[in-house]
Structures are given as structure tokens and as C-alpha cells.
Image: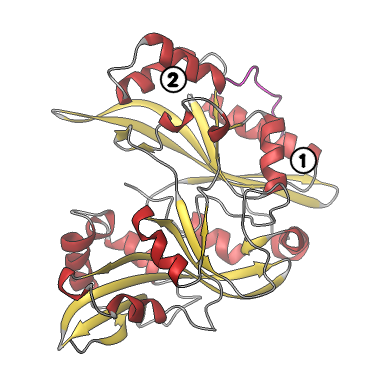
Amino acid sequence: MAVELRYATRHEYPEISRFLHEFWANNHVYCRDKALFDWTFARSTHWRDDQYSFALAEDKGLLVGILGGIPFTFNNRGASSNGMWIANYVVHPEYRKGSTALQLLSMFRRPEFHPMVAFGINPATATIYKVLRGQVLPEIPRHFLVMPGCEERMENILHAAYPDWDAGRARNLTRQFQLPALPDGADFSSALPDTWDRADWSELSRNFVGAARDADYLNWRYRQHPTFDYRFLAIEENGRHGLAVWRLETIRRKTETGREDLDRIGRLLEFLPVSESNAGNLFGAFVQQLKAHDAVAADFYGFHGELRCQMRRLGFKEAKEQPDSDRIPTRFQPLDGKGGGILSAMFIQNGVAPCSLDAACPWYWTKSDSDQDRPN
């Protein structure tokens, strides 16, 4: 079967949407929300205006495979290059025995797109990346906390996700993540500082490997997001700013008559302090905002070794370290007890530090990377 490869043009969304619906996931959010698809795959500062960053495989004009790419600026301790996240990798069943899948991958696995990262892979596909000499990573660590005084509310959420649980199991799991007391709040700005690239990110970037958190990225990823309302917390210390970004999510359960609001949770997507004291102030401001919006709990995903230690000192618990913690739901619209961790694979150049669970891991990588923080 002779297959031709190319990038999609901006008028081909209907064909891509139909293929996603039929072969990837029925009624996937990218099929329901063109604005979200455009925001993800038509980032004008990183791709041609007349194209989607989406590779297509065709046989005589018939679409037989797709692979989405999300371009980003890769930061390697202050040095910048191009990087690519890949998503929605699927081939028509009749073409899965040939080389179509590898050909699609080659559209983004190029020298100009290093590294190439697949964030959120199916465990069944991990072998493919290993065969291709990619690095398959452990699940990205998840950090969780339950707000003071919200024990019963968290137990109710667990009972809604797992109706067969007894009261003791839900109570024990909740207590493992209980934040003992509210920290003091701190004054913050809800705007990204004008000096961010020049004075803040330029310094922070030297200690990190991963997608650059410069102003272009932060504004695209959060301020311009077509669906979610993200909130910024910026706190100055000695002429530099620490930054946190989070959003409030309503927990909804599926009922016979539709979805029913159950509670609220905070999802922390960025945590970039400039010092230990600044981290405490950012955390205090975040938790006080959770209380002001009546959130029951909060979570944060991240690989960075030093930051993971800092999170534990502040009051988050790393989920994998607690018994039964793999049962804490990860999806909330609708509430889904199946959950599960997030696996990833990557192709990186020589000289780039590997990503791992080590305490010295320099990779700053959160759930906002790629398209993992999006509507269900």
C-alpha cells in the first residue's frame, strides 16, 4: 500500500475530526470543540499560518493515519531550541501491519524538532518506543492534598467514585492527604509580570530542562486557552517574581438525567518559586485561594526532583507513597474512578539530562505540558 505523508491544511478539520471520532475515541473533545483543536494545533508563533501541526497519511487521497504535533520552545538550562509534543497517534486498522505508523512518526522525529515527547502514552505502545530507542518514563508523580475541615466532602467524592467502598476505607485514604492547617496568605498579583522574560524566567531557566515557561508560552497556554479559566499568582521577592498558575474545576458525577455538580477541586499547573520563602508565600496564597473558592482538595503533577521535595515540605503528599492512593480519581468531568497514572516516552539528543524520579532530576514538567490538561 503506497502511502503519502504531509501536514494538514487549515481547512481539513472536518476530515481529521471524523477520523478521530471513528478510530481514536468516540466523540472526543477535539471532535466537539474546534476552537480547542485550533488552539492546540495552530499555534501561530510556532507553525505556518496555513497549516495545522498535524501529520496525515493518505493512500490515493484516503486518510489512513494521523499524528498531531504541538510545537514548543525547549529549554535546556537556559539554552533554547525547538521541541515537539505528539498526540493523537492512530492508524487505520488495515494499515497497522506496514510502515505507516513509523512514517507518520518521522514527520516530527526530525533534527529540527528535538526533543520529541509523547506525554500520556498507552502502556500497550511503550514497547514501540523502546524498540525505536526512545526513553520510556515512569508515571509522572502526582501530589495531592485535602483541605482542612473537608474530610467528609472528600469521603463523599470517594464514595461517589467507588460506591462499594466502606466508610473506613474512604476515611483512611482521606486522612493520608489531610493538610493539617491553613497557611498564612500573602499578597499577590494576578498578572504576569512585565519583567518575566528579562528578570524572572531568564534566571529560573538555568535550573530547568523542559518546555520554556517564557511569556509567549504562558500567555498561549493559559491566557489564550479557549475553555479553561486559569488564575495567576505572582509574588515579588528581592526584585524577582515567583509564579503559580492554577484553575478551579467542578467535580461532576454522571447520573441517569445528566451530570450533577458534586464539589470543587484546585488543579495547580505551574509552581515556579524563586526561593524557599517565596515558595511558602506562593503556597499560602494558593491555599487561601482554594479556601476562598470552597475547593475540597488540590493536586499537582511534576517530575522536578527539588520541587517535589519542596511540595512535600509545604504540605502536599506524593500520591504513590501512600497506601491505596492510586484510587484517588484523576478525572472529574465526569468523576471517573478508573483514573490511572500518566506514562510518557521521549527521544532526546545526547547531552540532555534524562528525566527520572531521582531527587536531582532537572526536568520541569507538569500536567499542562502537551495536551494532558484539557477537558475530558
Answer with mark 2 or mark 1, whichever residue precedes in sequence: 2
Horizontal side of residue 251 vs 90, given as left or right? right
Residue at image location 49% in from the left, 82% down from the top = 110
Are there few (<14), some (14-19), or many (20+) residues within 10 Å of tag 2?
many
Q: Position of residue 40 (x, y in %)?
A: 40, 64
Q: What segment carries the magenta color? A: 177-188
Residue 58 position (above or below residue 17)? below
Label 2, label 1: how far apart the Cα atoms are? 29 Å
**Who's the residue at 69% across and 47% down the image?**
305
Is residue 351 left or right of 298 when viewed as pictured?
Answer: right
Q: Which residue is drawn at 33% across and 32% down?
A: 337
Q: In this view, does 118 lie above or below 299?
A: below
Task: Please give the residue where the numbered disc 1 appears in the rendered image.
Answer: 278
On the image, the x and y values in percent for residue 6 come to 31, 85
Which residue is rendered at x = 45% and y = 33% of the image? 326
- As helix, strand or loop, the secondary structure at mark 2 comes to helix
Name the mark on residue 152.
none
Establish if 109 lies above or below 202. below
Which quarter of the picture shows residue 320?
Answer: top right
Give percent across and percent down for residue 203.
78, 61
- Is residue 282 at least partly visible in the picture? no
Q: Where, by quadrant of the figure, is residue 185 drawn?
A: top right
Question: Which amino acid is tagged 1?
Answer: Asn
